Amino acid sequence: MAYDYEDFKKDVYELTNINLSLYKERQMKRRIESLMRRKGYSTFDTYFAAMKKDTGLLRSFVSYLTINVSEFYRNPKQWELFETQTIPYLEKKFGKQLNIWSAACSTGDEPYTIAMILARHFPLNQIHIYATDIDEDVLNFAKEGFYSEKSLERLPKDMLQKHFTKKDRGYQINDDIKSCVEFRKHNLLEDKYPSQMHMIVCRNVVIYFTDEAKDGVYKRFYNTLVKDGILFIGSTEQIIHAKEIGFQTVDSFFYKKA
């Protein structure tokens, strides 16, 4: 029997612990086939065999698969809402020692954005953000903290001037903000979730998952949050079964654990 996409998915799961069956199939299969052609492979079996032998090829596959599109202060109006309404709410409810999780953080733009906004209100030594992603390469990039001018285009000028150092090829984020963020590898579809979070930020990621997988992630987010904790999602997302899960809509893209 010919090796097909179903076989490829099983082998990828065994090799990487990434369950492609939980991603929207037509969209993901099309992306993988496009990547295969660019890398010079015409069949799933030859591509998988090559990835098993070539670590670099495997890592490029994982990075491509996880769709690492990110930038600082993406969708500014949402971040303004986070600063003017969510932060005061969280501080009033839980104090200044907040547990915040940036899930699927990609290259670090999002957790560093959170840290810089919080730094306007809290002492740096009280800010701790847990930031996770499935892709080790983007986590290493985030830990280095060196960014192009383009990725910083939307960032307010005061943050750029205060928290970055201009270098020849771009901008280096300063160590005081770096120290506020703890980066770890984590698979949203497989790994155990942290607990007792006051806020979870997960934006523009679950749109690539099947409806069943989305519901599973949102239910686990609900269990991860403390009572009255906040979930902040992306501008292209909404939680279809929010009430059934136990979430209450606070504002566009902001949900509270009721």
Image (cartoon, helix red, strand yellow):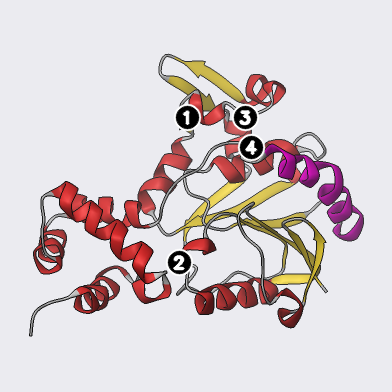
Name the residue located 69 percent from the left edge and 36 percent from the top edge: 116
Residue that badge 4 annotates: 73
Rendered position, 163 above or below 229: above
Residue 81 lies in quadrant: top right
Residue 251 lies in quadrant: bottom right
Query: x%, y% of residue 129?
Result: 64, 51
Q: Neighbour class for label 4 at 10 Å: few (<14), some, many (≥20)?
A: many
| Residue type, numbered disc 1 | Tyr
Rendered position, 58 above or below 172: below
Which structural element holds mark 2? Answer: loop
Q: Is residue 41 left or right of residue 212?
A: left
Query: What is the span of residues highlighted in magenta in the rendered image?
Result: 76-94
| Residue type, numbered disc 2 | Asn
Residue that badge 2 annotates: 187
Q: Is residue 186 left or right of residue 26?
A: right
Which structural element holds mark 3? Answer: loop
Residue 147 numbered mark, or none: 1
Residue 154 numbered mark, or none: 3
Query: x%, y% of residue 205?
Result: 52, 58
Q: Is residue 253 magenta?
A: no
> How far apart are the two marked residues, 4 and 1, measured between alpha carbons?
13 Å
Q: Are marks 4 and 1 in contact (CB under 8 Å)?
A: no
Q: Neighbour class for label 2 at 10 Å: few (<14), some, many (≥20)?
A: some
N-terminal-most mark, 3 or 4: 4
- Observer-nearest of 141 and 9: 9
